[in-house]
Image (tube, grey):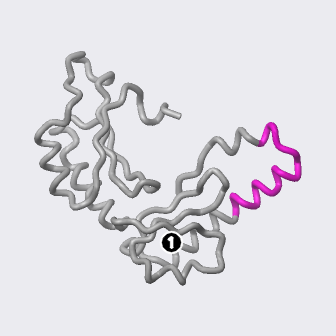
Amino acid sequence: LIIGAASVFAYKSMSKEDQVQEAKNQEQAINNGQFVKANLTEDEYGGIYIDDNNVLNVNLKDMSKKDVLKNRNIIIHSCDYSMTELKQAFELIGTKTNQLKIDYISIDEINNVVEVIKNPREQSNSSVPTDVPNEVIDLLKSSKVKVVYKVVTTSPANSN
């Protein structure tokens, strides 16, 4: 689950009642996420996340399973790739990170993609190319899922 840290800071300007409701909404979203993981396989969904309104969103690959999620406060989106497919692509790319000089890889459950991130600032050589190397292009084409290649100037962990 991806839980936004921004909601924690919002408590400062919220009334006590709103804070209690916010906490209840977050708890419900977390419980819904556990329900999804218990009742769907990773072949059937392609990501789950909690949005800014503390509502669980599910990227559903197998739309025939949407009835499993009815009567819950869940927003359902259709997606192209299952978690299984995303994890397989992640693992495939992960075996090549040193060879391809990739700094970070992650599964973006919101956008249903694998992200490959290059951070030239982390390289000692300032002439690191920012275009996508042919080896990366070939690997991305073989992964069977959408892979987003990004060149960033800050660490993904610090980019909020």
Task: Report the front residue among 61 and 39.
Answer: 61
In this image, 9 relative to 84: left or right?
right
Instruction: Give how far across and how far down residue 19 sits, in percent.
Output: 81, 50
What amino acid is at disc 1? Answer: Lys
Quarter-wise, where is residue 10 in the image? top right
Nearer to us in this view, 86 or 64:
64
Q: Residues within 10 Å of mark 1 (few under 14, many from 20)?
A: few
Residue at coordinates 75% horizontally, 55% vertically from top-left?
Answer: 23
Please, what is the dominant secondary structure of the magenta stretch? helix
Q: Residue furthest front?
A: 78
Residue at far right of view: 16
**Secondary structure under the numbered disc 1 in the rendered image:** helix
Q: Quadrant of residue 55?
A: bottom right
Residue 82 among those drawn in magenta: no
Mark 1, residue position? 37
Residue 22 appears at what percent x and percent y?
A: 76, 54
The quadrant holding residue 64 is bottom left
The magenta stretch is 11-27
The residue located at (33%, 67%) in the rendering is 84
Q: What residue is shown at x 12% (from left), y 48% (from top)?
A: 138
Q: Is residue 53 left or right of residue 132?
A: right
Residue 16 on the magenta segment: yes
In the picture, measured across the screen, residue 116 lies left or right of residue 61, that is: left
Q: Is residue 45 above or below residue 97?
A: below
Q: Position of residue 7 (x, y in %)?
A: 68, 45
